[in-house]
Image (tube, grey):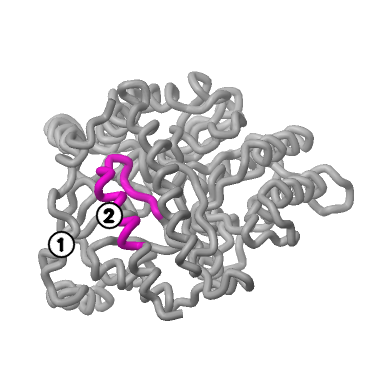
């Protein structure tokens, strides 16, 4: 049983607290103004109007002393919150023993690989090999190369709304315009299929089940019908719960049908769990909601938390087809990263996965709270998701489903910042608010953030 009083000790106690007249405050504005002179704004949140100066648990301070509730978890990274005492202890202990070990073997590297094998979903658990990287993009880049080597096939199927990183190879799988425009040509052989998005189903269906049925039918047609041009597929890669594409959570049956189509074609099934893994969906891996056994799984973000860690986990018989020494990665499984990742996994899984089970329960309460608010706040078009991976889609009109534009989304984000809550958007139109806090966020902060969001949305003049 996790006590809320214990979790409250892992964050600053008096959030939110804004002490400047508005945000960003003067020191933050100064730093935000100077940053583009020295650092590329090609990074994802270069223009976001917050400067992080201190962090503790689910809370963040800026250089002006403003204290925020952070509902982003560093974009789904800080699974156990920032500066968890046990993580800090692990870092201190490891820095006096071993940090960098090149790509050679090290005790912690082996221990981490064993631990990851033990937490994998069915099909991979205790029957897998892990290749470590530093980022989700690198993990996906590696997965593409592994698939081609293992299968001898060149084509890969991904989905509309997908985000699988931004490197040249994995960026070919990602569909967001801002990540693709003027950066091509991308690698050949990538085919995209519809991901079930019932609120805006491309097939014009009216229910989640109908939309999933049409999307599954289309994928089956692509993979297993002659003359579609999809005849050499090595793998289908899918987010079991889609992230940047809008926080979409399909039913188990859809993913089961995707797996069946893969098996019929002879293609591998890759679950991309970089954003949805590490307990965020209310299970260790989002694919576990469906019972599907992936052939390959990619992870990142929440496994490392405060330090970079990512990787590709393959079934052992597949991994045997990759030659020794063919994919050097100098900084993978750095000693500190390995120590922190093992600590994070311990925190997530101890007491029979109590923290993850709490996420599943509180996620439903948050959704209910937001759906209740939607009964009187007409700009909330849809509330969806699982665990601490909830999407709130905002629209100007519920009948037409016209999405909020950048100006309205800016008003929401700034309205929340001025109340001391950090939120970021996602979605095909950039109109989906992501509720993705650290798994250790106290319930009182979750309630406060939910109430403030409804308050800001209700105040909009639309």
In the drawing, what numbered circle is on residue 17? Answer: 1
In the image, taking residue 158 as reference, residue 368 lies left or right, namely left
Q: Residue at x 21, y 59 (%)?
A: 68
Residue 181 on the magenta span: no
**Which label lies toward us, 2 or 1?**
2
Residue shown at 55% from the left, 36% from the top: 287
- Residue 70 drawn at (x, y percent): 27, 55
Observer-nearest residue: 282 or 170? Answer: 282
Q: Which percent across, then down, holds residue 273?
A: 49, 42
The residue located at (41%, 27%) in the rendering is: 116
Q: In this view, does 395 lie above or below 439?
A: below
Cα gap from disc 2 to disc 1, whole angstroms: 12 Å
Q: Where is residue 336 in the image (x, y as percent from the top left)?
A: 23, 37
Circles 2 and 1, Cβ within 8 Å, touching? The answer is no
Whether residue 436 is in magenta: the answer is yes
Residue 370: name its quadrant. bottom left
At x 30%, y 67%, the residue is: 416
Residue located beneath label 2 in the image:
448
Asked whether residue 328 appears in the rendered view, the answer is no
Dot 2: what SS? helix
Image quarter of the N terminus? top left
Residue closest to the eye, 181 or 442: 442
Q: What element carries label 1?
A: loop
Q: Give the magenta part as a residue range.
A: 435-453
Q: Is residue 119 above or below residue 99?
A: above
Lateral position of residue 176 relative to residue 192, left or right: left
Q: Is residue 345 above or below residue 167?
A: above
Q: Can residue 252 be seen in this view?
A: yes
């Amino acid at each position: 049983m996790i006590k809320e009083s214990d979790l409250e000790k892992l964050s600053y106690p008096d959030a939110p607290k804004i002490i400047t007249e508005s945000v960003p405050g003067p020191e933050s504005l100064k730093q935000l103004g100077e940053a583009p002179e020295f650092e590329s704004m090609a990074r994802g949140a270069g223009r976001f109007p917050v400067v992080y100066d201190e962090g503790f648990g689910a809370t963040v301070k800026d250089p002006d002393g403003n204290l925020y509730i952070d509902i982003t978890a560093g974009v789904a990274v800080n699974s156990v919150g920032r500066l968890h005492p046990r993580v800090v202890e692990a870092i201190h202990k490891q820095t006096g023993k071993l940090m960098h070990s090149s790509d050679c073997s090290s005790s912690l590297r082996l221990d981490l690989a064993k631990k990851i094998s033990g937490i994998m979903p069915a099909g991979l658990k205790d029957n897998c090999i892990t290749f470590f990287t530093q980022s989700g993009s690198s993990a996906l880049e590696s997965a593409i190369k592994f698939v081609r080597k293992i299968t001898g096939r060149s084509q890969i199927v991904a989905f509309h709304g997908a985000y699988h990183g931004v490197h040249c190879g994995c960026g070919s799988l990602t569909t967001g315009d801002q990540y693709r425009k003027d950066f091509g040509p991308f690698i050949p052989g990538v085919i995209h299929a519809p991901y079930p998005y019932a609120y805006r189903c491309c097939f014009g269906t009216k229910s989640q089940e109908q939309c999933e049925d049409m999307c599954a039918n289309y994928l089956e047609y692509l993979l297993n019908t002659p003359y579609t041009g999809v005849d050499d597929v090595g793998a289908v890669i899918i987010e079991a719960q889609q992230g940047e594409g809008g926080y979409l959570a399909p039913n188990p049956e859809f993913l089961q049908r995707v797996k069946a189509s893969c098996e019929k074609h002879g293609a591998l099934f890759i679950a991309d769990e970089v954003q949805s893994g590490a307990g965020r969906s209310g299970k260790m891996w989002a694919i576990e909601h469906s019972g599907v056994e992936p052939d390959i799984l990619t992870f990142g973000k929440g496994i490392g938390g405060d330090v970079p860690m990512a990787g590709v986990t393959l079934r052992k018989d597949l991994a045997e087809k990759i030659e020794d020494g063919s994919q050097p990665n100098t900084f993978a499984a750095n000693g500190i990263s390995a120590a922190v990742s093992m600590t994070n996994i311990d925190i997530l899984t101890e007491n029979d996965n109590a923290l993850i089970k709490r996420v599943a329960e509180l996620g439903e309460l948050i959704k209910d709270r937001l759906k209740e608010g939607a009964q009187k706040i007409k700009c909330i078009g849809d509330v969806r998701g699982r665990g601490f991976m909830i999407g709130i889609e905002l629209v100007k009109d519920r009948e037409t489903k016209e999405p909020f534009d950048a100006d309205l989304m800016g008003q929401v984000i700034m309205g929340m910042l001025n109340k001391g809550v950090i939120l970021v958007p996602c979605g095909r139109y950039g109109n989906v608010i992501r509720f993705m806090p650290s798994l250790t966020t106290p319930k009182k902060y979750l309630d406060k953030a939910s109430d403030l969001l409804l308050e800001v949305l209700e105040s909009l003049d639309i």
